[in-house]
Image: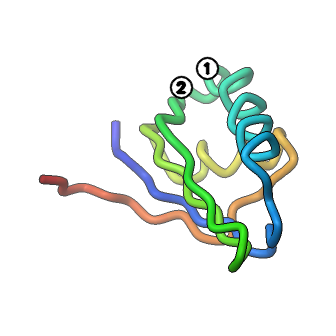
Amino acid sequence: MTRFMDVHHGMKGITGDQLQAAHKADLAIEKDENVHFERAWADPESGTVYCLSEAPSAEAVQRIHERAGHKADEIHPVPLAV
């Protein structure tokens, strides 16, 4: 399993409640693709949202996000961490 950081643009003004609802929507179906969404962050001013997950592929991450209603604009593997 690989870690991925995905990025969503165009979510200007997102609230904490909206971020939490989007994250919960991912968590509700993540097992269907053997994905685990670990954490999400947002910058309401720029409209950028970041999600950290562990998954078998970027495509699996995208399928969950699409089904949950918020397709990622970018998905990056994160093979190294300190």
Mark 1 and mark 2 in contact? Answer it, CB < 8 Å: yes
Instruction: Say what amino acid the circle numbered 2 marks.
Output: Asn
Q: Tell me the quarter of the image containing the N terminus.
A: top left
Instruction: Point out the residue furthest to the left here.
Output: 82
**Circle 1 sits in a helix, a strand or a loop, which is it?**
helix
Residue drawn at x 67%, y 22% is 32
Q: Nearer the viewer, residue 30 or 12?
A: 12
Q: Nearer the viewer, residue 33 or 51?
A: 51
Residue 82: give x, y in percent of width and height: 12, 53
Residue marked by disc 2? 34
- Relative side of 52 to 29, left or right: left
Q: Quadrant of residue 7?
A: bottom right
**Total number of numbered discs in the rendering:** 2
75 in relation to 36, above or below: below
Give the crowd class for mark 2: few <14, some 14-19, many >=20 residues within 10 Å. Answer: some
Left/right placement of residue 14 relative to residue 72 reads right
Q: Nearer the viewer, residue 14 or 51?
A: 14
- In 3D space, how far apart are the residues under numbered discs 1 and 2 (Cα atoms)? 5 Å
Residue 31 image label: 1
Residue at screen point 69% across, 79% down:
46
What is the x, y in percent for residue 41?
56, 54
Q: Residue at x 47, y 42 (%)?
A: 53
Which residue occupies 79% across, 40% down? 17
- Residue 7 tag number: none
User: What amino acid is at disc 1?
Assistant: Lys
